Image (cartoon, rainbow, N blue to C red):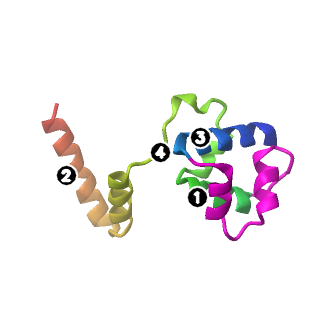
Amino acid sequence: MNMKNVAANINKYISMRGMTKKELAEKCKDINIRTIYKTLNGKYNTSFVTLNYIAEALEVPLSCFFEEDISQYNYILSDEEKKLIDLKRQLNSKMRERLLGYAEGLHQGNQ
């Protein structure tokens, strides 16, 4: 995938987030603003480090930028979903398994 496609995907996520390019650049404090704008214009062969900062600022997985068609995806998480993910990450593996089992049981009971 070329950088123009990556840039197009990033710009779609900026739009989905309701952000401006300037707001994104402000969230990526450790990256030079010119690098951000060149990346967003697809005119810069940017590093994965920069792309990772952008993904974190947009709160999406880095892999989203390399999808052929992102129109079918909605990786924007609600605050509640983010909280659940953060809590899950703090658990040890045994507790994660128990949580997954509990969630599956709730899901089956809700059908």
Q: Nearer the viewer, residue 73 or 11?
A: 11
Return the residue at label 3. 15
At label 1, counting other C-alpha atoms closer than 10 Å, the crowd grade (few under 14, some 14-19, many 20 or more) is some
> Which residue is at the far left?
109
Residue that appears at 59% across and 33% down? 70
Q: Amino acid at mark 2?
A: Tyr
Q: Earlier in the sequence, mark 1 or mark 4?
A: 1
Residue 31: say if magenta: yes
Secondary structure at numbered mark 2: helix
Q: Nearer the viewer, residue 1 or 34?
A: 34
Task: Determine the CA span between mark 3 and mark 2.
Answer: 36 Å
Task: Determine the CA span between mark 3 and mark 1.
Answer: 13 Å
Label 2 near label 4: C-beta < 8 Å? no
Q: Earlier in the sequence, mark 3 or mark 4?
A: 3
Q: Earlier in the sequence, mark 2 or mark 1?
A: 1
Return the residue at label 1. 57
Q: Amino acid at mark 3?
A: Ser
What stretch of residues is rendered in magenta?
19-47
Secondary structure at numbered mark 1: helix
Residue 3 position, x and y percent, is: 80, 43
Q: Residue 102, which numbered label?
A: 2
